[in-house]
Amino acid sequence: MQRIYIFKRFERFWHWSQAALIMFMMLTGFEIHGTYTWLGFQRAVDYHTTAAWVLITLWIFAIFWHFTTGEWKQYVPTMEKAEAVLRYYLTGIFTDAPHPFRQSTLTKHNPLQRLAYLFVKLVINPLIWLTGLLYLFYSSWDNWGLGWLNLEWIAIGHVIGAFLMLIFFIAHVYLATVGHTPASHIKAMVTGWEDVD
Amino acid sequence: MIIPTTITGALIASGLAVGLAISGVAHATADSAPAAALKQTTQGAAQKLDSSTADHTKFEALQADFKSGSEVTKACLTCHTEAAKQIHKTKHWTWEYKNPDTGQVLGKKHVINNFCTAVASNEDHCSACHIGYGWADNKFDFSVQENVDCLVCHDTTGVYKKLPGLAGHPNYETMEWPPKSGRLRPPTDLKKVAQNVGKTSRKTCGACHFRGGGGDAVKHGDLDSSLESPGRYLDVHMDAEGLDFACAKCHVTDAHEVPGSRYGPTATDTNGVQMRGSKKTRNPATCQACHGNAPHDQAAARLNDHTRKIACQTCHIPAYARGPRHAKMSWDWSTAGQLDEHGKRIKTRNSIGKVEYDSNKGHFTYDRYVTPEYKWFNGKVKYTLFGDKVDGSSIVKINEFLGGPDDPDSRIWPLRVFRGKQMYDKGLKTLAVLHTTGNDESAFWKNYDWDKALVTGMKAVGAKYSGSMGFVETEMSWPITHMVAPKEDALKCEQCHTKVGRLAGIEGVYIPARDRIVALDTVGFSLALLALISVLIHGAIRIFVSRKKKG
């Protein structure tokens, strides 16, 4: 057992503030969608919009960070050991089989994580960004030559993005508990240090 | 009122002093009297200057003891040489308007509404709201300049009143008014009124527009006498203690042509604020003419998005008849004509003292703080006119507001829909014209004989009553555009953005929180639930296995 420094300070800050924002935006977003009443429509919209701008700012910093540090390579997909990792989570984890993937500072994510996060970054996030910004700039559509757009399509796209994010969120939160101990991954995400074999 | 009453009062007082001096009444007192009066006037002027450059009390032409309104008009025309010619071109005079969109000939002269229904054969009564003198029947000469009534719009004294039954004249002799009230109304002091003319005001416009349809708060819903001196809560612009707008502040009039008629309304204007120098082809009475299309500040910028689909009035006039007056909501002519055991007219009142039943007119209902109905509207209105097919099988739309979600000129508008039941000719299959008023034998309000009254009424529009009449349900729509509430009273987001809100019946627009794709929600939440169940099962197995090992 040894400790390695996996998550740097900015990365941890990014992760947790993004987590808080996304949870808050799911809560306000589904209220705006009419699923329940919590803050009231007007406040839900105001807070959702403010949170969106904060998150966009955070993302701009995060993208900059990924490219300047070369950390973007962590998300380059690979199928190597992907099947083994999948099999581990489906059966091996119950029989104390060894994890087929060994974490390191250069490869902090297992192949399934890589694929999942890449899907978030290339599909879910852009879908939410694009539809969300169009939603925000509804009154400029005519000026931008987008008068043919229909708010319903944008809303549908945004809601699809929200459902994908919700599903990702459920899986992600659960998988955070599958480390050596249920809290070890979460602890690593807080302190930056992860125990590896 | 543009001029505060104190100023007006002072001017009237000083003006009268001059008037007395000039007319010689004061001669007997002292030679210094005119000088004193002049001094007083100068002092008064120094204290409170009117914005007008003319003091009508000083005009020689207005020193006469006028015998009729037309005599006053003649005097007016000696200076305002073109005024009557201008008036002759307006809807206020012709009661006629050709709608360029539909080609229909409209105006009070032609439209049959579901209030008093029609002007034809009832001119001497209805013309109490015509800006002329002498329109008693279809022989009225619309080309005579002296027939124009200047005073009804320009009176500032409040004593001038045209009475129904006098063909547009005020009373020139002492007269019992209201009829059978026992109260005597002194002759109209035309000289005083003529010498105190001024700009139009909420009171002068309201003399007719607050009282259309036969009384206060009957017709428009968003116009009634509470707007003569409203508080801010009732209308932010007309607020007597605040902005104090006169009607003409928005209905900016040129050559006596008052813009902003509901016969040719403007549903939206995307051309922004009308600056000085703007072409006068646009309607100056719209909200947008002053506020533009993005009137909300940055903090509430999202509200500006709504102007693509929603008329300003929809949010900013959350209800009409918000003053103390109850708006008339329906009028059922079918019960009119019932008399008591002595054959006398019946009039009953409801718990709030409003007339519920009147033998002359039938049954009424009233309401206050009325929630408007909402509809896509592009400014085009189609009327059901005399001769248009009405067979009693369906509700007749007196006027239909056109427009739809895919029409870029349409906005969601608040409407007042006035519902009624009224006369139609079963044989001719048309809305009927009823002769209601007058002293002749066929007038309905005199003898309550439908057939006789219809013969005379229909004859007035060149038709022959078939002899068979019935009652048909009708709806008349009115755009709600006055009684603009303060912003804090505007509709709240939640009043539309909810499953069943104000705009529940509006189609063709996606309203977040009202609308959803049910299938998408079902699939989305099912998958999320499935994910949750999966991880819970996975976790449960982990716990079970680890316990077993320990155990």
Image (cartoon, coloured by chain):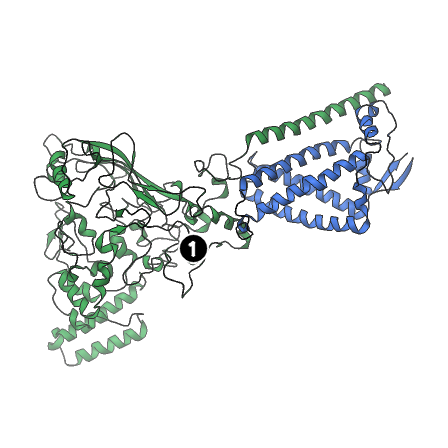
Chain that is coloured blue in the picture: A
Return the residue found at the far right: A1
Pinpoint the chain carrying mark 1: B
Query: What x and y, as percent, mark residue B132?
Result: 18, 56
**Would residue A134 be found to the left or right of residue B295 on screen?**
right
Relative to B2, residue B216 above or below: above
Residue B227 in picture, x, y percent from top left: 32, 52
Q: Secondary structure at mark 1?
A: helix
Q: Quadrant of residue B386?
A: top left
Residue A126 x %, y %:
67, 43
Residue drawn at (39%, 59%) of the image:
B243
Q: Who's green, chain-wise?
A: B
Does residue B22 lie above or below B422 as drawn? below
- The quadrant in which the C terminus of chain B is found is top right
Q: Quadrant of residue B292?
A: bottom left
Inspect this view and state whether residue B368 appears. Answer: no
The residue furthest left is B441
Q: Nearer the viewer, residue B387 or B68?
A: B387
Residue that carries the numbered disc 1 in the rendered image: B288
Front residue of A184 and A106: A106
Residue A189 visible to an observer of this rendering: yes
The quadrant in which the N terminus of chain B is found is bottom left
- The location of residue B95, given as percent across then percent down, is 23, 51
* Camera-side residue of B213 and B345: B213
Left or right position of B61 against B525: left
Q: Would residue B506 be found to the left or right of residue B69 on screen?
A: right
